[in-house]
Amino acid sequence: MAVREFAERGADLELVGIQKRFPGFTAIEELDLTIPAGSFFALLGPSGCGKTTTLRLVAGLEEPTQGRILIGGRDVTDTRAHERPVNTVFQSYALFPHMSIIENVAFGLKRRRIDDAQGKAHEALRLVELDHLAQRRPAQLSGGQQQRVALARAIVNRPALLLLDEPLGALDLKLRRQMQLELKTIQEEVGLTFLHVTHDQEEAMTMADTVAVMNKGAIEQMGAPQELYELPRTAFVANFLGQSNLFSGEVVSSNSESITIDVAGHPITVPLSRSQRHQGEVTVGVRPEKVALHLEAPLDDSGRNSLGPARVIDVSFSGVSTQYIVSVPGIGTMTVFAQNMGFGPVAVEGSEVWVSWDVAHGFGLADEPDSIERFPSDDDTRTIAVQRREALISELEGD
Amino acid sequence: MSGEGQAGVVLSGFTNSEEGERRRPVQVPRRRRVGLGDWLLPVYVTLAFIFLMIPIAYTFIFSFNDSLKSNISWRGFTLDKWLNVCNVEGGAVCEAFANSIVIGVVATVVATVLGTLIAIALVRYRFRARSAISLLLFLPMATPEVVLGAGLAAQFLAAGVPKDMTTIILAHTMFCISFVVVTVKARVASLDPALEEAGRDLYGSPQQVWWRITFPLLLPGIMAAALLSFALSFDDFIITNFNSGSVTTFPKYIYISASRGIPAEANVIASAVFIIALAVVVINQVSRAARAKRLAKELG
């Protein structure tokens, strides 16, 4: 039995103790998550972190191995996709190629036998400014237009929860920016709960109220975008969300306000309140744009951590800012972003420099960085699909 | 002239036309001197076509022959054979033709339904012996028809099944299924599973998703498979001959009457079949071209 009436507003989504195992690998280890009604929530993570699986579980396209899924307080774990008050904007858009745009948009309404399906579908198309193309086929539309149709087809049903599976992945940068704004506006206008899955950190940060960073089937950290960026709790978050300079060392002194670690003979201090660990081996970090570059040894370094002399090994100019890679003896390389306040770079390759940053800008992590990880970006969900298919094949043909 | 040749015409009209619309003529830089290849290829192609067309033209022309017993020498033009096609030999030609149609339609429907379901199962689901089944389905296509026909005949004999229309239909269904599976499988494999997921997501029950999304998207493949099945069944002689008992199909009728002179009525039916097949292709192409033109106009 389908849901016959429109959701009046967005609903809470609650995932309780979700685990999802595919033959051969575990996509989601253990997931507890509550998304409040009306929020724009982003699940951010690299390939294979379990974010797409999470989305498919919520949509009802996969069944969890364990755990419950509640939408608006109602347990929907045992219901099927067409019985859930949820709609999805698929990564590939998945517009029905044999139907016109208007038929695509009205599809969900007609299945639920809602009055005036045509009228409501036209209204949804007007919202995404595509009503004039209602009679076309999907193949006759551009990528951006198809994306908007996919969005209209989902929101026309007024689902309690709208799922977005990397819907902007296939668009070029300019169009993507435009869509991001449009999506945000529509979300505010219709007041639905949005769950957005993406590997694009910028997309997640600009659009979502709350971002959850996922890694290896679990949520590493969750919070407002600014909070996540300024105070990452794990090495993974520090590196996946923007860049970080990380240093590991033993805590040598601490007081009620800060702790100081020793990194190859250099003391580095972070505020106690911004550090997850307070003793033993601790990894601390600082964002590259918080680091200042000096051509002479800084005289007054009270309240600042400073390192040097160091050598500039790479300078790359990007218009607004310049990125310097600096080699600090005994510590390794650091990245520094400097705004181009004057004309051009202030240091050249080979220059001797000192770096410093405000103690208050540092953060202490709960774990250590493992080896340097590289994150594949673009082929994300596809990779998961391929992995999943292969795993399925191996299981079924194996027994 | 054979049914298989017709099948080729019909099918290519069906499956290739989509690509045909997209195809653009390639500009070849013109050479000054006229080389050997410039005339050899056109001449060769023309000769090849003439060679292919002669039997068809012969069949067509001699359907208007005012023949007596044998239809070998031209005795003058008449429309009698076309107008009284069922009135000779107590309507034997027409009866054979009707048998062929009935067998073709029933075998096609059964083979298409079963073959489509098998194709979906093979592509979408993983189960034990899946690859073995895939391989076994190829066997009827690879086995010589004589062997298949004789094998089936022996089986029916051993099981004590009398040979009639039913045994012919069973035999035809058997080899048609293989062709349907192969044709439809390609279509299923190219179908994006996300489309069906979107259907489920948009409140479509499993039945609705099948009838409104999966089936219409598979339809071109299913239609091609059905046409192929019908052509193969209509045309089949060898397997039919082993398993038909006293029932006469159109190919069997022609084979038998060939020894004492094929009546012009057979030419009439063969020509009619050819013309109908040709008309289907032409109508299909014209309507596609018209649609493409209309779309182009709409898009400006």
Image: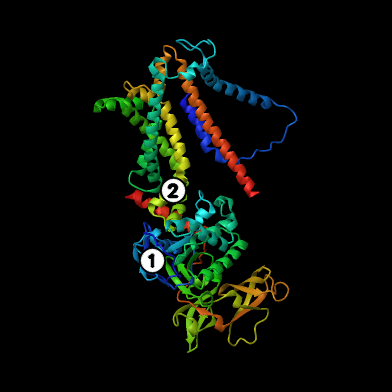
Q: Nearer the viewer, residue B86 or B61?
A: B86
Quarter location, residue A332: bottom right
Residue B260 picture quarter: top left
Chain letter of the residue beneath label 2 in the structure image: B
Q: Nearer the viewer, mark 1 or mark 2?
A: 2
Instruction: From the image, tell me which residue sits under label 1.
Output: A29
Disc 2 marks a residue whose amino acid type is Thr
Looking at this view, is A138 or A168 the one in front?
A: A138
Badge 2: how crowded within 10 Å, few (<14), some, or many (20+)? many
- Vertical side of A292 occupied by B39: above or below: above
Asked whether residue A49 is in view, the answer is no
Residue B262: image location, x then y, percent? 44, 15
Residue B214 - label = 2
Is residue A358 depicted above or below A164 in this figure?
below
Q: Position of residue A166 (x, y in %)?
A: 51, 62
For image coordinates 51% across by 50% down, the residue present is: A99
Residue visible at 55% across and 41% down? B18
Which residue is outermost to the right? B32
Find the distance from the CA under tag 1 to the CA under tag 2.
Answer: 34 Å
